[in-house]
Each structure stands twice: as C-alpha cells, then as structure tokens.
C-alpha cells in the first residue's frame, strides 16, 4: 500500500494493517484512496508504493511514480467527428466543385459524385467541416485507442446480456415443457389417481417453475466491493471458483472411470448413465474428439503425410504455413469432389431435378387386368419379361442373325442361323447348312463303303526269333566271316564307351549298316528283361 512515511507501529497495529491489506487484496474492503480521490491498487508491491523520505508526503499517493513534468501543450482532446460550422446558400469561388464546401477540393471530396456539380447548379451546397489541429507527442501519435469513445462499449454489453437472457428463457421453457409432458404421461397411465395426488403433482410443477438450482451454478452472481484490486467491479459470474465437485469425486465406484493424479486426467465419462443435460463433465476424451481439437488433430495428420511425401512443412516449426496448406488442401479436395459429382450427374442424370413421378407409378396402380394361376404364373394380361443380366445381350456379329449359344448339337454350342459350332465364325446362312448336310451324307456313304469292302483279318503267323527280342526274316543269309568281324568291331566300340580316354577325336559315323553289323549289334545288346543278363 502507499504510505506517507514509515513511522513506528506497535505489534497490534502492524497485525491490523496486514489484515486490512489482505482484505483489500481479496476485494472485501474498499481500496485506499490517494490525494486526488483515485483508488490505489492494493496488489502494487510496497517498494513501488512507498514514497521516498525526501518528498515528505503526508497522505498516500502514487505521484512519485508518475511523470512530474508534464508537457503543457499535450492534450487528450480529439477531433469533433461530423461537426459542421457553416453552410452557404450559393457557390463560392475556390470551393469544392462537387459539393460546394470550402474545406476541401473536388479531388478529396467524400460525397457521392454528382451528375452536375454544385458549381453549376448552385443547389444543395454542403456545409463546411470543422478543421482542427492537435500537437500530439510520440506516444499520442501511436496510440491506437486515442479518440476512442468508451461510452459506446455499453452496446456490446447490452448485446451479450440480451443473448444470456434469451438463453435462460429458452432453457426454462424447455424444462417446463418437459415436466408438463412427463406429468401428462403420468396422468394418462394412472387414470384412477385421487384428487389429492393431482394437487400434489400441480404443486410439484409449480415448484419446478420457480426452482433454478439445477443450472449448475453458472448463473450464480456474487456482489463484490467496487474496488480496483478486487478484479471486475459490480457483479462477477461464478464459472469455476472451487465450488464445483472435483471430477474424481463424481463417482466413487472403484470400477468407474480411472483418474490419473499425476496428469490430473480422467479420459472416460465418470457418469455414463446420467442425463447428459445434468452433467457438466463428460471426460477428457469428449473434449479431445470434438470441437477444434479434432480439426487440430486432422491438421497434424495432414502435415505428417505431406512431409512423408516430400513436402517441406512442419506443424511445430511453421504452424501458420501448415494451417494455410491444410486450408488449400481442403479447398482442392472439395473442388475435386464437386467436379466428380458434376461429372457423374452429367453422365447419369439427376433424378431430384427431373419432373415428379406420377402417382400411378409410385403407387403401382394401373388399369391393366392380369390373371394368374394357382402357382402364381401369369395367364393373361401381361407378357412375361425376362430379367436381363449385366452382360451385353442380343449382340449380333459377323453377319449372324442369332447370338452365340442359340444352337446345341452333339454337346456343342453354336449359331442357330447357320448351325456352326465355331465361335466368331462368319455366317454362311442356309447355304452353309446345306453344304454341311451334304458333307455329312458323303462322309456317311464313304464309311459305309469302306465297311463293306473290308475283308476278314488274316491270321498272324508266328515268327522264329533269331536272337533275344528280335524278328528275323526267313530269307536271311549271313556271311560268317563278316559276322565275326562285326562282332569284333562291336566289342571295340563297347570298350571305347566304357573308357572315354580311348575315344578318338575324329569320330566318323555312317548310315550304311550291313546285315552282319546289325546282327552283331543285336547279339551284343543288353536285354534288361533277360533274367540271365547279369551272366553275359
């Protein structure tokens, strides 16, 4: 607090002085007033509020903290906006050619440009503006609130108070309507209630109209002392001043929502079964997944994905850039969606913009008479409509007059128009059918002729085997000497095959094989089916 001079105080006076300072800081006692009648903020520390000893100030004051030497030319006055001084009846020389005022020229005129200026019409001469000049200091020239009329702020206050009153009125009407509906439902269910019970219900509704204790203390108003240090003057809304129940005390059940004392967080809803209108806390997850938190999360995800794709952006390093890029991305995405939608609607049409469907089609009524049998089949009145598949139907190609699969013969599909069983063949028409029938008749005649001309099969004579597994003709004559030489050559060839080192480089093959060489090959060949092959 601001004191004149430091004098001796007893312990009791010192204790009273400290209690008074605490009451002033809490807003329970009026603030101290200086020589000019202005309130002194009790939260100002003592080293700032205490006056120096050489000033010899007898009353509390903060003049020692203010500027002593003030500029006599400095003024807080401001331009008188919209003030007029004189209005002439005729145009004066040197005045504005548009409106006729002497305080500005036609180039700086702020009035609407006239079709014919006041210089030529001499009518509707505008009054002269009030010209003022002020000598402002350095801070006055740069003060953005210089000349602001504080009395206009009451309009903002009135607007917010009107909104608050409308909200309270609406909530009260909804609450009364809800209770009346509930009361009407109870009367409909319990028709045999006594007159005394009905009077109690009416009293209960009347009490609910007056009771405003369920508004969660948000409308609670406390009167506070008009002081500088007590915060705001007049009335203060009690939004959260330690009177609300802590979230970990809302539900004392052990199996309820978990409360983390370190982070002071409770993610789940502690009262999931309670009425949402009666709850002011729905869990931390409710705030994280709603409002601007969800949009911030989506912006983070977008910045991560853009960084992974090679774009130089970072949410924490350049948040403004990330937000701007995210907005551009959303605009481009909406534009692409609109373009896709327009393309689809242009291709397939829009049923909502077309003419309304007749009621006869909507209700399925018509004047056609349809007769059905006991099995539900249509007998008369309507043709049977075959359902179509998603594939193309009745597509005729290569001059065909029927589709593929319209002909079936001998387990083969074909075309009915030309009776061909080859897919994608050219249609030959009736000439092709006649040619195919003639070809078939000719083939049948040839088969019958061949069967008639065939003779009975001859008996197969048994041949004597010259060697193991070979057939030898009867007139076979072999030269003994040539056969012996062929056997020697065959032995040499066998030895060469076993030892590749004896194989010569220039190997000559000949296709001229004699009977003796063939007989030697047959005699030396290993017969794998021979049980005595291991003893050769």
Image (cartoon, grey):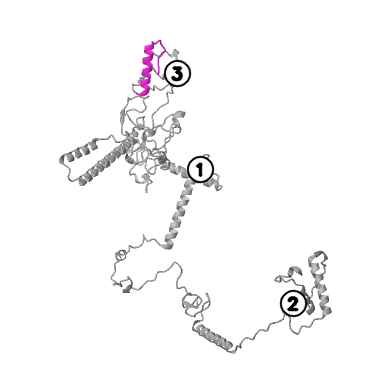
Magenta stretch contains residue 318: no
Q: Residue at x 27, y 41 (%)?
A: 175
Residue where numbered disc 2 is placed? 467
Which is nearer the N-term, disc 1 or disc 3? 3
**Foreground label between 3 and 2:** 2
Q: Residues within 10 Å of mark 1 (few under 14, many from 20)?
A: some
Q: Tag on residue 279? A: none
- Going from N to C along the chain, the mark reached first, 3 or 2, is 3
- Give the Cα separation between the discs numbered 3 and 2: 138 Å
Q: Earlier in the sequence, mark 1 or mark 2?
A: 1
Q: Nearer the viewer, residue 69 or 449?
A: 449
The quarter in which the C terminus is drawn is bottom right
Left or right for 224, reference 473: left
* Residue on which disc 3 sits: 47
The magenta segment is 1-27
Residue, disc 1: 321
């Amino acid at each position: 607090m601001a004191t004149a001079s430091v004098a001796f105080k007893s312990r009791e006076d010192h204790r009273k002085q400290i209690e008074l300072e605490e009451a002033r800081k809490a807003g329970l006692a009026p603030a101290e007033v200086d020589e000019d009648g202005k309130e002194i903020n009790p939260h100002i520390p003592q080293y700032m509020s205490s006056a120096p000893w050489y000033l010899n100030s007898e009353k509390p004051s903060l003049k020692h903290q203010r500027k002593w030497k003030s500029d006599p030319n400095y003024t807080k006055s401001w331009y008188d906006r919209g003030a007029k001084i004189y209005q002439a009846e005729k145009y004066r020389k040197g005045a504005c050619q548009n409106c006729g005022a002497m305080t500005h020229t036609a180039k700086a005129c702020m009035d609407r440009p006239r079709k014919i200026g006041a210089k030529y019409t001499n009518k509707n001469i505008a009054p002269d503006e009030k010209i003022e000049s002020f000598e402002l200091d350095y801070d006055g020239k740069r003060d953005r609130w210089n000349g602001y009329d504080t009395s206009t702020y009451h309009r903002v206050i009135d607007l917010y108070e009107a909104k608050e009153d409308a909200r309270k009125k609406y909530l009260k009407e909804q609450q009364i309507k809800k209770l009346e509906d509930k009361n009407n439902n109870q009367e409909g269910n319990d028709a045999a209630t006594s007159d005394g019970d009905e009077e109690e219900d009416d009293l209960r509704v009347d009490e609910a109209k007056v009771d405003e204790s369920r508004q969660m203390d948000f409308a609670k108003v406390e009167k506070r002392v008009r002081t500088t240090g007590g915060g705001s003057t007049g009335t203060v809304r009690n939004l959260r001043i330690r009177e609300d129940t802590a979230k970990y005390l809302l539900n004392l059940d052990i199996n309820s929502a978990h409360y983390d004392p370190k982070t002071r967080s409770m993610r789940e809803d502690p009262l999931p079964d309670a009425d949402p209108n009666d709850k002011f806390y729905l869990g931390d997850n409710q705030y994280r997944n709603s409002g601007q938190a969800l949009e911030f999360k989506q912006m983070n995800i977008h910045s991560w994905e853009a960084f992974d794709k090679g774009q130089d952006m970072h949410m924490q390093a350049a948040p403004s850039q990330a937000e701007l890029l995210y907005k551009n991305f959303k605009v481009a995405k909406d534009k692409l969606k609109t373009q896709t939608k327009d393309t689809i609607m242009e291709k397939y049409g829009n049923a909502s913009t077309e003419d309304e469907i007749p009621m006869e089609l909507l209700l399925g009524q018509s004047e056609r008479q349809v007769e059905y049998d006991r099995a539900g089949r249509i007998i008369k009145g309507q043709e049977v409509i075959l359902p179509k598949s998603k594939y193309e139907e009745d597509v005729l190609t290569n001059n065909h007059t029927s589709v593929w699969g319209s002909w079936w013969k001998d387990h083969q599909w074909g075309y009915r128009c030309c009776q061909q069983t080859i897919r994608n063949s050219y249609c030959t028409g009736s000439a092709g059918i006649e040619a195919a029938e003639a070809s078939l008749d000719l083939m049948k005649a040839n088969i019958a002729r061949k069967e008639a001309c065939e003779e009975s099969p001859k008996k197969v004579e048994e041949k004597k085997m010259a060697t193991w597994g070979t057939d030898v003709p009867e007139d076979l004559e072999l030269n003994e000497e040539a056969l012996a030489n062929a056997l020697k050559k065959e032995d040499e060839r066998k030895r060469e095959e076993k030892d590749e080192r004896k194989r010569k480089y220039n190997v000559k093959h000949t296709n001229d094989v004699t009977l003796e060489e063939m007989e030697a090959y047959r005699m030396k060949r290993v017969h794998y089916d021979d049980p005595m092959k291991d003893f050769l």
